[in-house]
């Protein structure tokens, strides 16, 4: 997988202050968060209430 160079630069800029010390760890955690959000979309929408 390739990352957009601008996004990679942004990730590398936050790593020194992050709990994730490598780009791979950061991306893996990000993917897990997105998967959790997608898998629980209905629950999140219910918590937010009607539009």
Image (tube, helix red, strand yellow):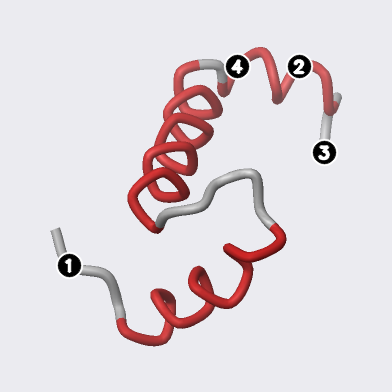
Distance CA(mark 4)–CA(mark 2): 6 Å
Q: Secondary structure at mark 4?
A: helix
The image's mark for residue 51 is: 3
Distance CA(mark 4)–CA(mark 3): 14 Å
Please, is residue 50 above or below residue 24 in the view?
Answer: above
Q: Secondary structure at mark 3?
A: loop
Earlier-in-chain disc, 1 versus 2: 1
Distance CA(mark 2)–CA(mark 3): 10 Å
Q: Is disc 4 in contact with disc 2, using a CB cutoff of under 8 Å?
A: yes
Q: Secondary structure at mark 1?
A: loop
Earlier-in-chain disc, 4 versus 1: 1
Q: Is residue 22 left or right of residue 48?
A: left
Q: Closer to the camera: disc 4 or disc 1? A: 1
User: Which residue is tagged 4?
Assistant: 42
User: Which residue is tagged 2?
Assistant: 46
Please, is residue 42 above or below residue 4 in the view?
Answer: above
Earlier-in-chain disc, 4 versus 3: 4
- The count of marks equals 4
Earlier-in-chain disc, 1 versus 3: 1
Q: Closer to the camera: disc 1 or disc 3? A: 1
């Amino acid at each position: 997988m390739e990352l957009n160079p601008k996004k990679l630069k942004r990730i590398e800029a936050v790593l020194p202050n992050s709990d994730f010390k490598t780009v791979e760890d950061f991306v893996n955690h990000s993917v897990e968060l997105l998967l959790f959000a997608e898998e629980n979309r209905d629950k999140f929408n219910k918590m937010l209430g009607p539009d």
